[in-house]
Structures are given as structure tokens and as C-alpha cells.
Image (spheres, rainbow, N blue to C red):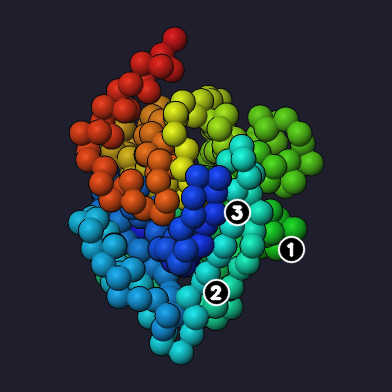
Amino acid sequence: MSLVVTGTVGIDSVYTPTGHAEKVLGGSCTYFSAAASFYTPVKLVAAVGGDFAPSYREVFKTFPNIDISGLESRPASKTFAWGGKYHANMDSRETLFTELGVLTEAPPPVPAAHTSSEYVFLANSHPGVQLSFLRQFPKRKLAVADTMDLWINIAKDDLKALLNEVDGLVLNYDEAELFTGKQNPVTAAKQIIAESKLTFVVVKKGEHGCLFVHKDGVAMLPAYPAEQVIDPTGAGDTFAGGMMGYIAANHAHHAVKDRVHFEVIQKALAHGTVVASFNIESFTLSRLLTLKKAELDARYAEFAKMVRV
């Protein structure tokens, strides 16, 4: 089924206790689409500047299921750039610099051929921009948004408006507390659902996995017990990509009253967890570029045995 994502395509410089990578391909759209492409074709809509080298575009072409016809190039502008340094525990980081570039400009247009997409993921950006993008997909069956503390602080009303038009929200533990004032993530997620038209909320807890609160129930998943963490950048985006990719590929077989069933999303979260566990094994997309579907399936089977009760 058709899956589309919008967000950022950028240039990252990352420093970790294990090494560093400078001016590498990054951005929420980039990681999401790479992960989703293992499950289903994915269309990417984003903008880059004149400093976006052809070699970055070639990386996307390595993944046969990614359509970058919606990646707009603006020669007179600068590509979004981010630099970060991770601390010894790899669970916290400091931002060294953020250069918004094209993100300060009007969002890119959605190609006409993309507007029939049925599955929509709104990667992290201003909720007003996300809502404008969402409304261009009249045939959508499932729409999920990501957000961050910045928008909760400066655009909360816009975010609330968005949550009345999407089906799911992905955010982390601290953001759920910031949004609701509730420390307990289950209570926070239930409040977000009660005060919106959402069907479900996924609360990411980093190395401690994720919490899934749905109108039909509550579930939780641990993180995959990775032995090697080289670079956590993009872990949340690859998690979301694996989740949405699986749903887009399997929802039609498990639809209940046109709503994605609880068990489908629960299984999708496991797939997202496994894809993310590969992503953290190297800088930028290096590990996903060499990942084979057989490896992904084998680790998923291993993870399924780990969480069985």
C-alpha cells in the first residue's frame, strides 16, 4: 500500500565515544524512508538546498523502494544541517549546532502523483506545516505524526489541532509529560487520546523500549538488547519507519471497521524496534545500506521469542 513521509532531509555531523562522522546524510525523512523501504515502497517529500551533493541522492537510490521525486532542490538555499555530541551512556546528547536552512522557507509541494497515498507519516516539523501537508491526502487510511518538545512549548494549540486530524502520535517520555503535566506515561498517553481524536499514542523510552496506548488496550515492548551501539542518531525515525512500513504492507489484511487493529500496530512496533537495532550499529545509514531482508527477518524472529510470555 502507498506510504508517504514528510519531514527533513539534512546533513549531519555526529560525535560519539566510538568515533565521528561529518557532513553525512541525515534527517527524519531519510532514516524513516530507509527503514520503511524494507517493507513497502515509500514516497519522500522534503526540500534541500544547493549544497546537497549528488552523492547524497545516490544513497537514496541504493534503496530500491524509495521514491525521491518529491525531494525538491532549491539551489539558492541551504540544506538543513545538524551537529550533535553523544555522552558516554549514548542515551543523552548535546546539540552543537542547528542550521535550519530550507526549513525557514515554505514547505515543498506534494507531487500530484503522491496525493492518493493511503498511509501518511508526518515526521517532526512545525505542527502547522504537518497539518497543511496532511490535508493534501484525501484518501488516507492512517496518518501518524511525530513531534518534539519545541512545538509543545511554542505551538501547542497548533499541535492540538493536528491531533484532531491524525490517528496516531509518536513522542518520547519527556514530551508526553511536558504535553500533559503527567509523569506516568500511561496516564499521559490516555489523557492525550481523551482530549483529541487520536486512536493511539506511542511513547518512546529509548533503551527501555516503548509504551503503546490504544483505544483498544495497552501494550509495551522492550528495546532489542543490542551489544554494540555506535551511533543512536535516527533510531526514533527508523523505529517509526519500520512501524509504518509494516502497517502499510499488512493493514489491508487485518482491517477492523477501517481502523488499524491493535494487534497489527503492536506487531508493527516490534518490527520498528528491530530495524532501529540495526541502525544504531553504525554511523548514518551505513548499516541499513548493507542490511539484508533475511537478517531483518531472523532478528525479528529472535526478538519475538525474547518477548513471548
The three-letter amino acid code for the residue at tag 2 is: Leu
Labels 3 and 1: the sequence-earlier one: 3
From the viewer's perspective, is residue 83 above or below residue 262?
below
Amino acid type indicated by mark 3: Lys
Q: Do the numbered discs 2 and 3 sit on residues whose CB atoms are within 8 Å?
A: no
Q: Residue at x 68, y 32 (%)?
A: 185
Q: Nearer the viewer, residue 108 or 81?
A: 81
- Residue 103's tag is 2
Query: What amino acid type should be assigned to the residue bearing mark 1?
Result: Ile
Residue under the point 45% across and 67% down: 23
- Label 3 sits on a secondary structure element that is strand
User: Measured from the top left, where is residue 74 in percent x and y?
Assistant: 42, 84
Q: In the image, 92: left or right of 142?
A: right
- What percent of the width, then of the height, locates residue 203? 59, 37
In the picture of the structure, the residue carrying the numbered disc 1 is 154
The image shows residue 145 at horizontal and vertical percentages of: 52, 52
> In the image, 304: left or right of 201?
left
CA–CA distance between discs 2 and 3? 22 Å
At horizontal 23% and vertical 58% (from top left) the residue drawn is: 62
| Dot placed on the residue nearer the N-terminal end, 1 or 2 | 2
For the residues labelled 3 and 1, the Cα–Cα distance comes to 25 Å
Q: Which one is in front, 170 or 281? A: 281
Query: Which quadrant would residue 228 be assigned to in this image?
Result: top left
Question: Which residue corresponds to mark 3?
Answer: 85
